[in-house]
Amino acid sequence: MFSVSALGELLIDFTDAGISASGQRLFERNPGGAPANVLVALERLGHKTAFLGKVGCDMHGDFLRKTLEEQGVDTTGLISDPDTFTTLAFVALSEDGERTFSFARKPGADTRLTTDELAYNVIEDSHVFHVGSLSLTNEPVRSATHAALAYARDHDCVLSYDPNYRANLWSSVEEACEQMRSVVPYMNLMKLSDEECVLLTDKSDPQEAAASLLAQGPSVVAVTLGEGGAYVCCADGGMEVPAFPAVAVDATGAGDSFWGGFLAAFCESSKKPEELTLDDIAQFARKGNAVASLCVRKRGAIPAMPTRAEVEELLNQ
């Protein structure tokens, strides 16, 4: 059985890597995509995972499949499509490690996954089924995402969600809000950033936003606060969990690594979402903060994901 399977985007992050001798901008090819990042974080922490999505039959798609397989992620549900090109993202970094994105996705392979192509046997064999929100931007993958969530719910999977807003992938903010909010009632566990609170709830305060989301169905809501760590809440209450100090080299994958650590701790607890206490989820968030702290100290989300030993060493300091 898989601890976690995830559906969504698998893409190339061409990350800002400085200036060439001739004065031209250099970009480094890195494997990326938020759901894939979460799975690799889990694999590094000792959990069996599987990915569902689509890449092109091209050099980038082959590289991404090989990367996941080398990390131990099951790729039974990863489709290679000869009729579309692997999605690309160009990532510029500021001095403090923050990012701006430009996408080659018109369309990208990740948006072309259909309901008929879903690996339903993988979903059924998963304890947790995880999605983001980039699979809600376009058809046919939007319908495939809803079909996968319905199937996972019907087969008693724990449902996990991390909305990931990229303004230039939506026709309008209104469409983004509508689609990103549409799957919240499905969820058991949910993570978002402080910057996404307004988009998901019309509330800018993380505690108010988390309470609003909790009332819509999820048993647990976590809001990442950057250097401030995370705010977590459940029926038992809410609290902030401080981050571990870190000098960020590259913030790409920070939220994904946090959620990978959180989900790993959840799976290790053997508890159902509705059974979790505030103390439980605070400990999950502490592990997530440790994973994120170690991740941002290196470049490239997937290569930067820490091992279980590295995380345990930080947690025990």
Image: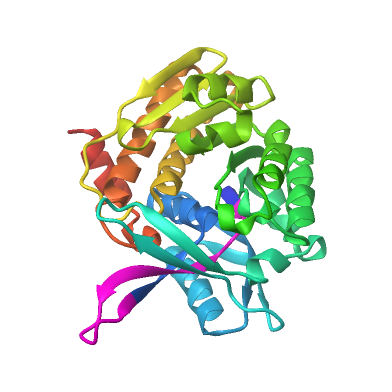
| Furthest-top residue in this view | 236
Residue at point 77%, 56% (across, down):
144
Q: How many numbered marks are there? A: 0
Which percent across, then down, holds residue 31?
44, 68
Q: Is residue 17 above or below residue 290?
A: below
**Identity of the residue drawn at 73% across and 56% down:** 121
| Residue 84: quarter of image | bottom right
Q: Is residue 52 visible?
A: yes
Which scheme is used to colour this image of the protein? Answer: rainbow
Residue range in magenta is 6-26
Q: Is residue 115 left or right of residue 231?
A: right
Q: Residue 152 location, x and y as percent?
A: 73, 44
Residue 142 in which image quadrant: bottom right
In this rendering, would 306 be left or right of 203?
left
Foreground: 5 or 255? 255
Q: Is residue 105 magenta?
A: no
- The x and y percentages for residue 201 are 62, 29
Q: Residue at x 45, y 48 (%)?
A: 256
